[in-house]
Amino acid sequence: ILGTGTNLCYVEKVARAPKLQTVREFNKLPSVATWCNAPYASSGQVHVINTEWGGFDSGKQVQALPISAYDVVLDRRSVNPGEHLYEKMISGMFLGEIARLVASGLIAKGHLFKGDVSESFVTQNGFTTEAMANIEGSAGVKEMQRVLEELGIMKPTESDCRLMRSICEMISTRAARLVAAGLAAVAERSGRVKDFKVAVDGTVFSKYPRMQARITAALKELLGNDMGVTFTEASDGSGVGAALAAAAVSA
């Protein structure tokens, strides 16, 4: 899922998942994959693993993610500081706010909109990921000006439009590359770099301009031009995936 939030599930051999074979202490929750008692399945079987990858790198002293000053501010003001850092860098709930923080800093220095502010750029979450997508998807300056005027910016210049577009492109491209890094890790873990099919649900993937192309380009950088990671859009992926998993167990 790559939309308002994000997550990834994949099929893993039980033999390669120690948590599925170990009895946990009674006061700890069982594996997210099942509510049965360990061992959950024989080592020759497979399980659907819910990675909850949105929480990657959370709670660590030394972080692997390329956290910027803007990410720190966004995280500190969020409802769950210190948690779901990966999700806050790639999902639709947060991309617009990162762009707003970058833009508001430039506005304060007089580098954008001649230092004039609007409610959209001084209010938390006032600039949305949808607005980012509209700016990036604009056919030209006039269309970008219209988008910015709807956000309360009076007479944005061509320079303003191009700078805002650059901000949006940098943030969305970073998100795409981080998504690719996660997918590459799972593809390698699965041993299926040459044939790894990904069913995707979510508006960031399906509707954000050039998102899929950027993810694919980054995957080729990481895995080689001959990598076999391909995408299929899956409407209601969560519901369909749960139904298929249940059908497989009952079959």
Image: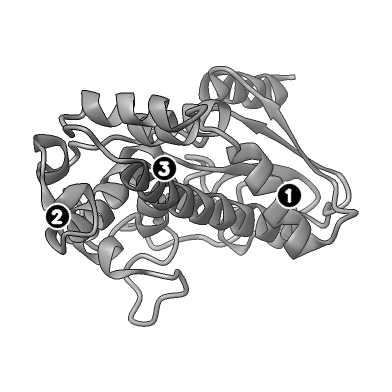
Q: Which mark is residue 91?
A: 3
The answer to whether one can see residue 78 in this image is no
Sequence order check, earlier mark of 3 and 1: 1
The answer to whether one can see residue 189 in this image is yes
Name the residue at 30% across, 40% down.
157
Q: Given the image, on which type of amino acid does mark 3 rest?
A: Ser
The reply to whether the C-beta atoms of the residues labelled 3 and 1 are less than 8 Å apart is no
Q: Which residue is mark 1?
A: 42
From the viewer's perspective, is the residue at label 3 or at label 1 nearer? 3
Q: Which residue is mark 2?
A: 77
Instruction: Residue 60: name its quadrant.
Output: bottom left
Vertical placement of residue 238 versus 178, above or below: above
Q: Given the image, on which type of amino acid does mark 1 rest?
A: Ser
Sequence order check, earlier mark of 3 and 2: 2
**Tag 1 secondary structure:** loop
Name the residue at 35% across, 65% down.
58
